[in-house]
Amino acid sequence: MNGGTEWNGWALRARGLFVRGGARAVVSGLDHDFENGGIHWVTGPNGAGKSTFLRVLAGVSSPAEGIVAISPPAEGSPAPVRRYYHPDMRLPPEIRAWDWIRFIAPRKEGGGPDGLLPPHLNSRTRIRDISTGEEKRLVLWSILASRGDILVLDEPFEHLSAEAKGELTLALDGRARRSVVVVATNQAVPEGMVPGSLLALGEALTGVNPS
């Protein structure tokens, strides 16, 4: 088990995974389990292939070889909800921020990570009027406030203030206890997180940690 935690939910299982980024291998023959109980970090410098790898984990792209399978917590479980965030995601610029929040609110799971909401919004604020960092906070809040059994987040800390990064870290830490959470970052991994796993990309990554 990853991080020594008891598995009690969905799992994302990579087997014999070979992922290419252009002419080179990003991962080669990777066997790895992504389970709930801790955040699974994918690190490495820009150009290491983090986004390419996460697109495969999110089901957006296909690997060159191998599979990424989703294991249910029990036979007969409903289809999983898999959510994917990438840095280029944007909201419609002309909508009002509070209209978007009211749209998402009925779909909130539990209390929701409301600390991520940008401060100082009012009923007239449109998405076009807020900063890139504030818009990203709103996108991330939308994803984390909604049901998701598997969350794959590509560079979610990018363009966030120190305060917003702290709120996001707390939200991810809590969410990883009940959902599979995979996060790619070129920044330092926050200390004190519930243990999951760490995959450092650079040279072609290989590894075996199946349960």
Image (spheres, grey):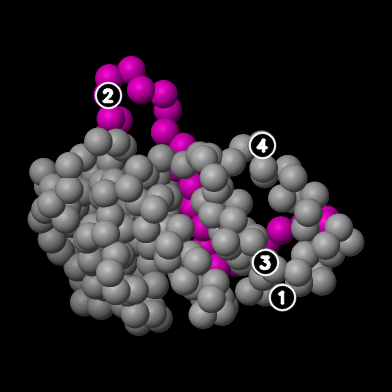
Return the disc, 4 or 1, that comes first in the chain's sequence: 4
Q: Residue at x 71, y 58 (%)?
A: 91
Circle 4 residue: 106
Tell me the mark number nearer the camera, choosing from 2 and 4.
Answer: 4
- Which numbered marker is on residue 74? 2
Q: Is residue 26 left or right of residue 158?
A: left
| Cα separation between marks 4 and 1 | 25 Å
> Within 10 Å of the Cα at label 3, are there few (<14), some (14-19), or many (20+) other Cα atoms?
some
Is residue 171 depicted above or below 35 in this figure?
Answer: below
User: Mark 4 falls on what kind of element?
Assistant: helix
Give whichever of discs 2 and 1 has the lower sequence position.
Answer: 2
Label whose residue precedes the other's in the sequence (3 or 1): 3
Disc with the residue nearer the chain's start (3 vs 4): 4
- What is the distance, in whole Å, between disc 2 and disc 4 at their CAs? 27 Å
Q: Nearer the viewer, mark 4 or mark 1?
A: 4
| Location of mark 3 (residue) | 118
Position of 22 compared to 139: left or right? Answer: left
Q: Residue at x 80, y 49 (%)?
A: 99
